[in-house]
Image (spheres, rainbow, N blue to C red):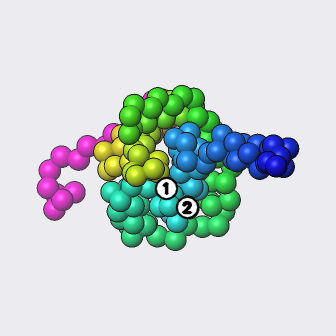
Amino acid sequence: MFKVSRWLPIVAIALLATGCSRNSPKEVAKTWLTAFNRLDADGAMKLSSSATKNLINSLNELSGPVPDSTLEKLKDITVDIKDVKEEGSKAIVTYTTSDNPHERTLLLVLVGDKWVVQFTKADLARDLAEAGEEAKESAPAPTATDSTVTISVGSPANQ
């Protein structure tokens, strides 16, 4: 005789495990962004498309060693997923980070049955440009305290 009570715990665990999928766009984006912001190339590459893996490799080749103090500061950055819009095999995730309150987006694509991040050079350039604009906005305005200008007339031999 088949006993339902014997199988109930197994079915419940299976349902809970699939309901808390780590392969959702939200979870993949949060994990990838956390790794990327902490300069954890290996962690980010596990959740990246092949083009994004190439970009991360290029960035690693261009960058030098990062001081431990900087890596420690980067660990404090948190990611907050604001919205996820799935459209077939693509998902657009809107997020902020604790060091940048402006909303940004991240594209994920479905490769087989796995969501991966599609982050391109254009995305990187956009993020760097936005960071530059924010730095300009938060920089103090120039002051007129030192406006001395020296002008010399003539050739250096006459002076």
- The answer to whether residue 78 is magenta is no
- Around disc 1, counting alpha carbons within 10 Å, would you say few (fewer than 14), some (14 to 19), or many (20 or more)? many
Would you say residue 138 is visible in this rendering? Answer: no
Q: Residue at x 14, y 50 (%)?
A: 154
Q: Can you tell which of label 1 and label 2 is closer to the viewer? A: 1
To which residue does mark 1 refer? 47
Q: Amino acid at mark 1?
A: Leu
Q: Describe residue 79's horizontal placement relative to residue 103 as left or right.
A: right
Whole-number angstrom distance, CA of label 1 to CA of label 2:
7 Å
To which residue does mark 2 refer? 43
- The answer to whether residue 147 is magenta is yes
Q: Residue at x 67, y 54 (%)?
A: 75
Q: Position of residue 134 (x, y in %)?
A: 47, 34
Q: Position of residue 115 (x, y in %)?
A: 47, 48
Identify the magenta region: 143-159
The quadrant of the image that shows the C terminus is bottom left
Q: Position of residue 106 (x, y in %)?
A: 44, 39
Q: Amino acid at mark 2?
A: Gly
Q: How many marks?
A: 2
The answer to which image quadrant residue 156 occupies is bottom left
Q: Any mark on residue 85, and which? A: none
Q: Nearer the viewer, residue 143 or 156?
A: 143
Would you say residue 87 is visible in this rendering? Answer: yes
Tags 1 and 2 in contact by the CB under 8 Å rule?
A: yes
Q: Residue at x 62, y 36 (%)?
A: 80
Outermost residue on the right side: it is: 5
Main secondary-structure element of the magenta-colored stretch: loop
